[in-house]
Each structure stands twice: as structure tokens, then as C-alpha cells.
Amino acid sequence: MSLCAGFAETDITPPIGTRKIGWIIRIVSDEVLDPLYARAAVFADGSARIGFVQLDTLSVRWTTTADIRHRIQERYGFPGEHIMVSATHNHAGPAVSGSDGYRDEKYVETLVEKVVATFGQALDSMVSAEIGIGRTVEFDITANRRLIMRGGTVKTHGTFDDPDALCFEGPIDPELAVIAARSPANGAVLGVLVNFACHPTHHGGETTLSAGFPGCLAAELKRQEIPVTMYLNGACGDIHFSDPTGRRPPLSKEQLGTALAGDVTQVLYGLDYVDDMPLGAASTTVQLPYRQPTEDDIKGTARGAQRFVDPNVYDRQMPALLERIKTRGTQPAEVQVLFMGDHALAAIPAEYFVQNGLRIKEEAAPTHALVVSCANGMVGYVPHAEAFKRGGYETTFGMGTRLAPEAGDILADAAIDLIKQGAVK
């Protein structure tokens, strides 16, 4: 079989004055620090094709994902169910999601058309390719942002300067995986996909637009003659680049992007490439139960509750949230897996906790599983079940944390089952 690959990217930087999303409160942009992009990658093995779309946005709605897939399939004949649409989870981007009518619909329509055109450019650029998949581990950039406190609660973004801070609640995922395609003619790298788990929150509470550290990563690798870099965020729901121990100062987006670029370069240097690799895709839709909140949950007074930035936002959204839970019963969510040789990329439409992602990686063996969060929709935070007992921001009941504790395992079970069953050509 003959492998082919194609990559493309398009500037999707919104105009100044566009609404931002990613910091609970409403912010209108007044400055652009660096460009935001939509990126696409397509791969073919002679019998199957798979595609990736990556947006420098906070998230992507399921309806937007479906629209993008439908237009691509109609325009180019590419199977929509074989396309993963993911967001980097950038906190300094435009309001492409959100409730209360806050989404910038005009920008979203422009964005969708740009994404579809970018995918077409990737298809047009397809050439014979060799593919290499490798990894390294990175322990110096991230930390679990949830600290267990005396008394048994959790504080999100706590520090060990607090005498009540005892320990990290959970681990990190140090794996940084790289999927690279190169020309067999001259060895030039056509593009790379980078999978790593970390919250991109730089400039989130400001009026500036930025692609954050994933943008800096792509820019640094472009200076090294890698034309397109797609950042596929891992299970980053409780993972951040700040250091609660105080052993190092906070990393700027430039420092973080440059460090990750160094990791990618290290992987590329030792990568083994192949000219044949089976590709495929599979997906399923699961029904996730909603939480059944107590009065304390609704009021924000439950043990360990941590309402960030503007507590009133929770109160304003509560009537609509309670009505949703009453009328809908469950939240549908797509779990998708794209297969590349002995690797499988599991797309989860959530801010997925690292323990959930690590469970998929562990139990999917011998397949080497990678987890892509904020992909093909967004159902909010999905912590691991034990996290709900201690509280913290991510488990505090609200529009962004509306699912029952078992949701994390339901999504993981679905991903593991798909991986075990294998690809559907």
C-alpha cells in the first residue's frame, strides 16, 4: 500500500471587537498579539482515508463539527465520519461556543467556511509520504492543578505556600507524542501532529487575542522548516503549566512553546519512518447522565465548591441548566478513534481529567493509544469519579460541570471498546 499525506493551514484571526471566550466573564477583544489558525491534515493508505482539523479556539461545538464534516463530504467526497475536529483549548480566542447567546455567529460561519477550504487545500497538497510516530516524556512543564487540603477538600490552582496544602490530587501525563509525515523524495517534513496535555490559558482574562503556547510551538517549528504543526491537546482537564511548588516562575507562552518545540525536534531526530501503515476510523455515540444536584450544589455552597472569577455567572445560568437536566435526561457525546498503524487516537468531547485519559492508554494496550480532548464537541469538564468527593473548581456544579461522576468512565469504556474492536474501513 502507498501512503499519502497533505497539510494546510489558514489564518482565522478574528477582527478586533470580536467577543472572547475562556474566562467565565464576557470580554471583547481590542488587540491581536499573534495569529490564530485552522489547520488540516489528511492521510491515505490506498484503501482508507482519515483527516484531522485543529482550531486555535477554546472548543468546538458538536453542531459545528457536524457542519464542517457535512460540507467537506459534500464538497470533496471525503467521509465525514473519518474526520476529527479538535480545538487546542485556547483561552484567548473568539467566542465560538458559549451559552446565553454569547457565541459570535457571524464569525463562526466565516470560520466554518475557512475550515472547509483549508481541508480542501490539504487534499490538494497530498503527495506520497512516509510516516513516523514517536514519543518522549516531559516532566518539567506541567503539574496537576488540584491540591488536596487539610480537611479533605481540593483547591484548584492552590499553591504549597498555603500551610493547608498537603499534596497533588493526581498525576500528570508526561507523554508527548509526534506523528510526522515526510517526503520520500527528499526527506523534507510535510507536517507534524503533536499530542500533549496542558491547559493553554495565557492571556485568557485579557482583551488580547492570541493562539497561546500552541501557536508559539507551531511558529518555532516553522522556523525550523516544518510548515504545519497541529497541536492535539491531551487529557488536560486538571493539568496546567503553573508550578504550585514555587520552584520555578510561571512559563510564558513563548517559553512553553519553545520547550515543546525542543521536545518535538528530539523525537523527530530519532524517528523511524515507514511507507506503509494501515489507517482507519471508528466511532460511537454514548449517552452521559446529568448530575442530580442538591440545594447546596445549586447555591454553590456544597463542600469544596469553588466558583471562579464571577460567582454570579453560575446563578444566572442555573435556571437554564436545571431545565436542561429536567427535559433532556442525558447528554449525547461522540467518541471517535482514528487508527494509524499500531497507534489509535481517541477523540473525547470534553475537558477530560488526566486519570481518565491515562486509563484509556493503559487498558487499550497493546495498541498505543493517544487521547485528544476538546474534540468533536464539548460537554464540559469530565473529572474522574473520585474527584467529586473533594470538590474544587472543576467539580463545582454549573453549566461547565453538569455531568454525573460516572461520565468519565462511560467515555473511557467507549474509547477502549472501539480500540479493541479495531478500525472500520
Image (spheres, helix red, strand yellow):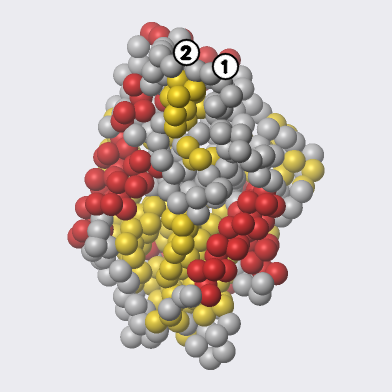
In this view, the residue in front, 77 or 240, is 240
In this view, the residue in front, 98 or 413, is 413
Image quadrant in which you'd find residue 221: bottom right
Q: Residue furthest right?
A: 31
Looking at numbered disc 1 in the image, what kind of residue is underneath it? Pro
The crowding category of the residue bearing disc 2, from other C-alpha atoms within 10 Å (few below 14, some 14 to 19, many at least 20), is: some
In this view, the residue in front, 16 or 211, is 211
Relative vertical location of residue 226 with respect to residue 315 in this rendering, above or below: below
> Residue 243, position in %: x, y?
58, 37
Q: Name the residue carrying label 2.
A: 300
Q: Is residue 330 visible?
A: no
Of labels 1 and 2, earlier in sequence is 2
Which quadrant does the N terminus fall into?
bottom left
What residue is rendered at 53% in x and 44% in y? 142
Q: Secondary structure at mark 2?
A: loop
* Apparent side of residue 37 relative to residue 66 in the rendered image (left or right): right
Q: How many marks?
A: 2
Which quadrant does the C terminus fall into?
bottom left
Looking at numbered disc 2 in the image, what kind of residue is underneath it? Gly
Q: Is residue 159 visible?
A: yes
Please report contact status of discs 1 and 2: CB closer than 8 Å, yes or no. Answer: yes
**Mark identifier at residue 311:** 1
> Residue 28, position in %: x, y?
73, 34
Q: Residue furthest bottom?
A: 185
